[in-house]
Structure formats: structure tokens, C-alpha cells
Image (cartoon, rainbow, N blue to C red):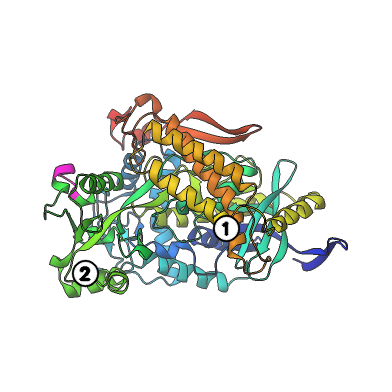
């Protein structure tokens, strides 16, 4: 490995720091960390990059638990039932092989996490406790109170620090570099120093999470701006299922500063009920069998319907009530929720009802990957976690996101490490590096358009026109706004220099945010049906002919969409899931 400044040009007075590695991982959340551990243990040198700080990734916001068929609480649970639940929740456009691998391997990944030192809640017999969650047949969520994501990050971080894994925090990757058709490196800006880095690698893993910040009200943290989607798309990778955006049924509605902040599904899993302003348990009307524990899209739309019908709370939500479970139970099972509402809203959830409303939560779509290795269609490029697509189809089963980052994070590290052993470091023109550095520098010319204004317009547009219920007129309006913003973004610039410049970061994030938004809207226009998280008021039913995936590719004159058949499910797996879908 090397790390040295290289002068580019005396006149330009520019320099970058060069770093070489076998496997370069962009994103240090659960998927990126798990991939780093796996790649390192497979014998590769590994470098991990984080836009934020180590241990501060969006994974820490995941609260409810990890879905894994351990059968500790419900002995009838099995990988087959978990597979069937995942396929049903994805409304049968999930990649069956990814769902199969997740269901089979999640238990081992959970036990492995426990061996690493994760402290799960326990049953009276001493095994890992599992709780109920929406649309799961059995109690399956392995949890640490309502702080499961934090425990995962702390545990994986400890493993990272005990290995010789190179780590760069506050590093924003601006471009992937290619040797012919193969990804062979990246250019990064160290946000806290203003230094440029050239990373040369044999393989690159994108694990940057989702794009929820393109909406005004979201449970996603500030990092979730679709960076990896933009990087992969510009490098020629295919995206898939981008129209599928999950609205979590329960986000905080006040105070304004925390609007959208996640209220874990674990509240409902532990017995919480939903009430409208009349005190009616309205899920009896929308889902009399599964009630509050139905699929997220169903519960979210029920909440939305009650609010629109005028039966909402004073702050525009519905009530979530768990007071009947008692103070000691709530403080033990839901300590973060207790503190969150007390600190932010002045509400004691042991005595008072919570006000909640749907919030943008998760992208089911993303970079199209191979189920076995997480390789993309671009040689040398891999992806895992929320930024990757295929597993969740039209809607994600709660708890499958944390299982996803563990199962496919490991597979991603294994796949990238294996690939890196078959190639040497690639070559690319140094002029491409110089050109990218100059592009980034040009964004500090303060004579242009304010990127914050453009971002605010995008968030407003997506929230108003591409929400929980969609229609042709609003989607066409949204697309027009996005295309105009794309033109305006070419003139975006900020004041100040390269170091500690949040405005510059916003300008760098904006193109990826616009790429993600354009894909979502184009796909939503194309999919003239309602399936899973994608609901159209003008096409309220599923269309059997659209039980397919939409692929998104960068063409010479813009974004291209293509319908592609869902991989055929083998007969032995068909027997596990309802036959009527065929």
C-alpha cells in the first residue's frame, strides 16, 4: 500500500494523495463493515471509506430487529416460511435466489454477530429473544431492545478495529474511475481537510445506503442522498425497481425539527395499537386479521387514509398507543422510544399516546446485482445493502434490511475479494483524475445557483407529487420539475473553499439525488398498476402482465427503461409459496 502526495501540475498547484488496495468499499454502515470483514478474512487488503464518521452510519437508526428464522420463540418457524413471507411481501417481483439465500443464511449471520459480542435480548431459557413484526408469520425479529442497529454497528466496528483494515472517514467519493469497461478506482474529497485522494483498487463495493433525503419528510439520516446510485449509474451499472419506495407507517409528526423520525415497528410488535381522533382502532376496518401487524404498505396507506378523511390528530397524524402494556414493560422493551418522545416531544409514552404518520423510509430498488456475489453488470463493481436491489421486490419485510446487510454484506466481501485475486490494479488516464478535481473545485465559484435551493425544490416536488399515492398528472409534473432542476444544477456553486464546506457537499450530492428522483418518477409512470409500495390511484389494481422488473440504464441521450422478466422460480421453491400468483 502507498499513501503519498503527487504533484499534478505546478501551474495548477493541485495535488492528490494516492492510495492502493485490493478491495475498496464505499460506505461504512452495516453492509460496508460486514463486507470489509469478509474481504479481509478472505486474504485481501481492504480500504473502507465513510462519508460520515466510523460508527455513525444510518444503520444505527434501525431499531426493530434482524429477521432470522431461529425458531427460539415459535418452534414452527423455518427458512421456508421466512422465504415465503419475503416473496409475498415483495409481491413476487423479488429475485427468488436472493430471498432464498437471505432466509437460509440469516440465522448463521445472527449467531456470528453474537459470537462477535453482540448482546441480544434473551428468552427465559437464555436463547436470543425474537419479537413479532408486520407481515411475518412467526415471531422472528432478533433484537436488542429498540437499539438493534446501534448494537450491530458497535459490534462490527469492534471487528474492523481489530483487523488491519484501512479506514478514511469524512471521505466523499465524487467519481468512479474505469480501466476500459472495468471499475478500477475512485476519486475522493476528504471533507474535513479539503484534500483530494486517488484510490486505485482491484474491486469496488458500493454500500452507501438509500436516497430518502430526496423527500422532505423521511426517517433517513443526512447521509442518505443516493450517492452510490449516482456513482454506479454514471459508471454504466444497471439500476432496478427504483419506483419502489417504502413509506414506514409510523414516523414522528412533531415537533417540526424531528418530523419523520422513525417510530420503530417494534412498538406495534410489542402490542401497540393505532387509533384515530375518535378513539377507533381503525386497522379493524383495513386489515381485520393482521391488524397493526400487516405489511407496511397496507398500514401506511391506512394511516394516510384516516388522516385524509379528517380523523387525524391535532398535528396531522394518528395515535399509536402502548400505555396499556405498563411503564416497566415499555422502558425495558422500548427504551429508545421512551427517551425519543420524552426528549423531543415532551411525551411520556408510558402514560400518553404517540402521534405518528407515514414517513419515507427505504428504497427497495437500487443497483442490480448477482445474488451469489453481489457483482453488477460492470466488471469490478459490487454492491450490497440498501443501495442494491433484487431482494425486496415491491416492498420490504420489516427486519429484512438488517438481515440483508449481514447476509449480502458478507457475500459482497467474498465476491469482491475473489474477483480481486484474478486481476491486477487497473490503469486510467491521470488527466481524468485532474479533470474530476477541477470539476469539484469549480463548484466553489459562488456566482452560480445555490444548491440548497435546488435541493429544497426537489424535496418539495417529490413529497407533493411522488408520495404514498401516485397518479399520472402529478408524476408528469414531477418529471418536468426534475428535468428543469437537472439543467439548473449544472450552474450550482457555493462560496468558500474545499475544507469543511457543507454547501460544497450539497452541490456534490445533488446530481445523484436527481438521478434517483428521475428514476423513481420514470418508473412510477411506466408501472401503470398498484403493486406493493407503488400505489396509483388511476391504476388501483395489480396487472399480472407487469409482474416484472424495470431496469434503468444510462443511454447516450438520457435514462433508458426496460422491462425484464423476474427470474423463474424453481419448482421446489414454488411449492413453498401460494400457487395462485402464477
- Which residue matches tag 1? 506
Instruction: Tell me the mark number nearer the camera, choosing from 2 and 1.
Output: 1
> Which segment is the magenta one?
285-291
Q: Which of 38 and 335 lies nearest the eye of the viewer? A: 335
Q: Check contact, mark 2 vs mark 1: CB within 8 A.
A: no
Image quadrant occupied by the C terminus: top left
Q: Which of 319 and 464 lies nearest the eye of the viewer? A: 464
User: Regarding mark 2 in the picture, which secondary structure is present there?
Assistant: loop
Q: Determine if the magenta segment contains residue 290.
A: yes
Horizontal and vertical percent position of residue 322 = 18, 64
Kindly identify the residue that appears in the image at 15 percent across and 71 percent down. 326
Kindly identify the residue that appears in the image at 51 percent across and 55 percent down. 409
Q: Is residue 384 visible?
A: no
Residue 90 located left or right of residue 278: right
- Closer to the chain start, of discs 2 and 1, is 2
Give the residue at the far front of this rendering: 447
Horizontal and vertical percent position of residue 480 = 50, 36
- Which residue matches tag 2? 349
| Disc 2 from disc 1: Cα separation | 36 Å
Amino acid at each position: 500500500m502507498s499513501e503519498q502526495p503527487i504533484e499534478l501540475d505546478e501551474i495548477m498547484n493541485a495535488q492528490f494523495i494516492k492510495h492502493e488496495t485490493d478491495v475498496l468499499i464505499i460506505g461504512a454502515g452495516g453492509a460496508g463493515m460486514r463486507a470489509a470483514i469478509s474481504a479481509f478474512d478472505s486474504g485481501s487488503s481492504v480500504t473502507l471509506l465513510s462519508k460520515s464518521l466510523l460508527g455513525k452510519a444510518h444503520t444505527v437508526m434501525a431499531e426493530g430487529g434482524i429477521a432470522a428464522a431461529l425458531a427460539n420463540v415459535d418452534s414452527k418457524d423455518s427458512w421456508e416460511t421466512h422465504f415465503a413471507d419475503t416473496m409475498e411481501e415483495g409481491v413476487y417481483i423479488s429475485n427468488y435466489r436472493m430471498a432464498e439465500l437471505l432466509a437460509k443464511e440469516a440465522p448463521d449471520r445472527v449467531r456470528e454477530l453474537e459470537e462477535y459480542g453482540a448482546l441480544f435480548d434473551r428468552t427465559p431459557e437464555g436463547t436470543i429473544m425474537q419479537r413479532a413484526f408486520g407481515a411475518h408469520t412467526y415471531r422472528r425479529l432478533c433484537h436488542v431492545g429498540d437499539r438493534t442497529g446501534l448494537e450491530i454497528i458497535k459490534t462490527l466496528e469492534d471487528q474492523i478495529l481489530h483487523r488491519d483494515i484501512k479506514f478514511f472517514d469524512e471521505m466523499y467519493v465524487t467519481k468512479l474511475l474505469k480501466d476500459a469497461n472495468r471499475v478500477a478506482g475512485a476519486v475522493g474529497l476528504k471533507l474535513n481537510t479539503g484534500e483530494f485522494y486517488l484510490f486505485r483498487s482491484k474491486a469496488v463495493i458500493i454500500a452507501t445506503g438509500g436516497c430518502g433525503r430526496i423527500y422532505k419528510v423521511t426517517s433517513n439520516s443526512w447521509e442518505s442522498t443516493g450517492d452510490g446510485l449516482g456513482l454506479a449509474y454514471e459508471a454504466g451499472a444497471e439500476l432496478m425497481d427504483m419506483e419502489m419506495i417504502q413509506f414506514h407507517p409510523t414516523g414522528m409528526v412533531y415537533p417540526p425539527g424531528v418530523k419523520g423520525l422513525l417510530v420503530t415497528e417494534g412498538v406495534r410488535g410489542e402490542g401497540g395499537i393505532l387509533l384515530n381522533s375518535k378513539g377507533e382502532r381503525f386497522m379493524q376496518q383495513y386489515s381485520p386479521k393482521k391488524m397493526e401487524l400487516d405489511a407496511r404498505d397496507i398500514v401506511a396507506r391506512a394511516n394516510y387514509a384516516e388522516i385524509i378523511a379528517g380523523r387525524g390528530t391535532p398535528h396531522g397524524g394518528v395515535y399509536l398507543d402502548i400505555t396499556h402494556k405498563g411503564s416497566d414493560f415499555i422502558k425495558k422493551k422500548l427504551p429508545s422510544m421512551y427517551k425519543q418522545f420524552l426528549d423531543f416531544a415532551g411525551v411520556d409514552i408510558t402514560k400518553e399516546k404517540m402521534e405518528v404518520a407515514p414517513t419515507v423510509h427505504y428504497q427497495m430498488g437500487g443497483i442490480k446485482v448477482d445474488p451469489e456475489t453481489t457483482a453488477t453488470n460492470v466488471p469490478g463493481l459490487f454492491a450490497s445493502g440498501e443501495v442494491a436491489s433484487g431482494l425486496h421486490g415491491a416492498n420490504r419485510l420489516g427486519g429484512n434490511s438488517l438481515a440483508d446487510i449481514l447476509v449480502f454484506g458478507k457475500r459482497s466481501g467474498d465476491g469482491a475479494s475473489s474477483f480481486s485475486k484474478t486481476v491486477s490494479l487497473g490503469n486510467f488516464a491521470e488527466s481524468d483524475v485532474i479533470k474530476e478535481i477541477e470539476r469539484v473545485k469549480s463548484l466553489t465559484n459562488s456566482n452560480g445557483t445555490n444548491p440548497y435551493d435546488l435541493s429544497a425544490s426537489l424535496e418539495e416536488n417529490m413529497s407533493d407529487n411522488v408520495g404514498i399515492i401516485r397518479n399520472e398528472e402529478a408524476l408528469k409534473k414531477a418529471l418536468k420539475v426534475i428535468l428543469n432542476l437537472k439543467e439548473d444544477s449544472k450552474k450550482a456553486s457555493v462560496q468558500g473553499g474545499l475544507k469543511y464546506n457543507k454547501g460544497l457537499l450539497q452541490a456534490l450530492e445533488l446530481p445523484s439525488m436527481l438521478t434517483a428522483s428521475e428514476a423513481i418518477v420514470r418508473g412510477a409512470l411506466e408501472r401503470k398498476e398498484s403493486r406493493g409500495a407503488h400505489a396509483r390511484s388511476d391504476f388501483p389494481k395489480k396487472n399480472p402482465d407487469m409482474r416484472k422488473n424495470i431496469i434503468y440504464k444510462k443511454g447516450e441521450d438520457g435514462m433508458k427503461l426496460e422491462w425484464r422478466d423476474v427470474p423463474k422460480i424453481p419448482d421446489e421453491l414454488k411449492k413453498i409459496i401460494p400457487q395462485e400468483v402464477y
